[in-house]
Image (tube, coloured by chain):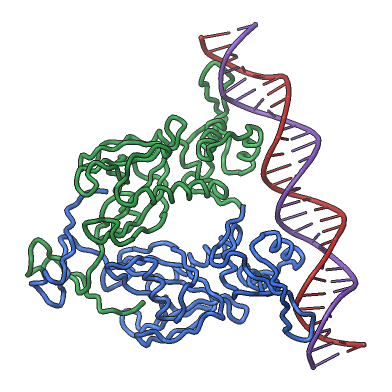
Chain colours: A blue, B green, C red, D purple
DNA sequence: TCAAAAGTGTTTGCTATACACCCATGA
DNA sequence: TCATGGGTGTATAGCAAACACTTTTGA
């Protein structure tokens, strides 16, 4: 690491200067935010959470939930906090996606955004407007509105990552509630790959994974045979396949 | 994105205050750096480039090459620039690895580092001391010296990523010069996976990839049969395997 | 008794692995 | 002629894909 003489951040006590801008540095510093792509499956479609912007720039456009990183806050903590503020839910699956820092991506100042991918079953989400009273809404990945900043790029990367991980991890189980039937699991996979999957092959594969167990219970969901109910073996941990 | 009232960065002209710290903000801003894990294969071992720190903190420890992001500089451009300053080489393979921002990882101020993974064949590298005259040296991944900051974590992630990508991409070809023999290619893979590979199976696999072509030339390297020389088909592009 | 989803095996092709000898060269 | 690495094929096992009918329930 090159040792340019960056100085220590001025504490508020040092602010003998402009009381509006009390944090001064020898060199310009970018602002750092986190943005979160939260996917869930609703109505058999992959959807994600967006917030309507109430201020310029991009007033009226939709944007990913996110916000500035507090100066003593870990990046993932920041992403989780922003998400909790918007969704009211904690302990969602969260993984770092990548960092977006093209100069000019925010017209106000240099902003570098650390993007996160989050997944949750619809059942765990009760989206309410955030503290800033902005509108929050779900949009199908296939029908997104005009987006602020470079959020279309971030979403595209999140979607590619999610689909790629299906092949070698059990990440998709994060989109299901604690218990589920094999048909529900299959529907999740079919939605994600946007194709039909053979039922017998899918069930064989799922059971060979050794990551789910039969609860012994059955779910009656209509005028047809009840379905066995399964549970993820090690909750909150995603497995990697060979 | 939450709309906290971050202000525009003050330009130098605004600096009516402390001339030592002319860049002032409403809220504290972290510093942002890039750090690069540059791997190459030397002496049949996977090695990486480190810089000896000449200043506190961690004076005398070794650290990844890297440095602060200029306020109008793209992140990848910054990583490439730092690398060029250390190695004198441009157009190395470079991919974003992840962002490390734990509070306290730099004792001076809050520093968020965007880490990059870089690969190059030894033949392209002519490491010279950087402009800051710090010592640069290669270390085998298996025998690293004490490292500054959280650079051990960054290196561990880079190594995991590199090895993981062997399975589904042609990333390892970035460690070879423009032309190479199949034995040289196999040595690269054996070094990376740290195991012997069956020669016939490896050659079958490599040729089925359809990413290399026979140049028609031969390389005479000793008192034995000359080896066919191959070339990567689409230079500078890594392929993804099913 | 009907409609609707749950549940269940076998065959086939492909891909990964194991394995041993001859070839071309320079010293 | 010998030492050294270059170069080649076949047999087997394990995984992925195709494919259709019976079961259980509620209405």
Position in image of residue A44 (x %, y %): 62, 78
Position in image of residue B198 (x %, y %): 63, 33
Q: Report the residue at 40% width, 57% height from top.
A: B98
The mark tally for this picture is 0
Which one is in front, A201 or A240?
A240
Q: Report the residue at 50% width, 42% height from top.
A: B172
Which one is in front, B153 or B35?
B153
Q: Quadrant of residue D13?
A: top right
Left or right of B212 in this view: B73: left
Left or right of A201 in this view: A49: left
Position in image of residue A49 (x %, y %): 47, 78
Q: Report the residue at 22% width, 44% height from top.
A: B59
User: Can residue A152 be seen by looking at this rendering?
Assistant: yes
Position in image of residue A241 (x %, y %): 61, 55
Residue most toward the front?
A: A216
A106 to B239, vertically: above or below:
below
B157 to A19, vertically: above or below:
above
Q: In which quarter of the image is residue D6?
A: top right
């Amino acid at each position: 690491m090159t040792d340019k003489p960056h100085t220590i951040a001025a504490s508020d006590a040092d602010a003998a200067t402009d009381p509006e801008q009390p944090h001064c540095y020898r060199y310009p510093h970018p602002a750092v935010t986190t943005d979160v792509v939260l996917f869930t499956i609703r109505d058999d479609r992959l959807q994600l959470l967006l917030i309507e912007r109430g201020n310029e720039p991009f007033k009226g456009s939709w944007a990913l939930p996110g916000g500035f990183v507090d100066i003593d806050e870990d990046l993932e903590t920041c992403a989780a906090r922003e998400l909790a503020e918007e969704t009211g839910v904690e302990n969602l699956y969260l993984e770092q996606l990548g960092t977006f820092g093209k100069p000019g991506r925010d017209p106000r100042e240099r902003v570098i955004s650390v993007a996160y991918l989050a997944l949750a079953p619809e059942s765990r989400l009760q989206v309410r407007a955030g503290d800033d009273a902005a509108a929050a809404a779900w949009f199908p990945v296939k029908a997104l509105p005009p987006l602020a900043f470079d959020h279309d790029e971030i979403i595209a990367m999140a979607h590619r990552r999610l689909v790629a991980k299906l092949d070698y991890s059990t990440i998709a189980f994060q989109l299901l509630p604690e218990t589920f039937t094999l048909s529900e699991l299959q529907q999740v996979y079919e939605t994600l790959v946007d194709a039909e999957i053979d039922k017998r092959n899918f069930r064989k594969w799922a059971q060979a994974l050794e990551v789910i167990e039969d609860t012994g219970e059955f779910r009656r969901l209509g005028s047809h045979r009840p379905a066995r109910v399964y549970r993820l073996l090690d909750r909150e941990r995603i497995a990697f396949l060979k």
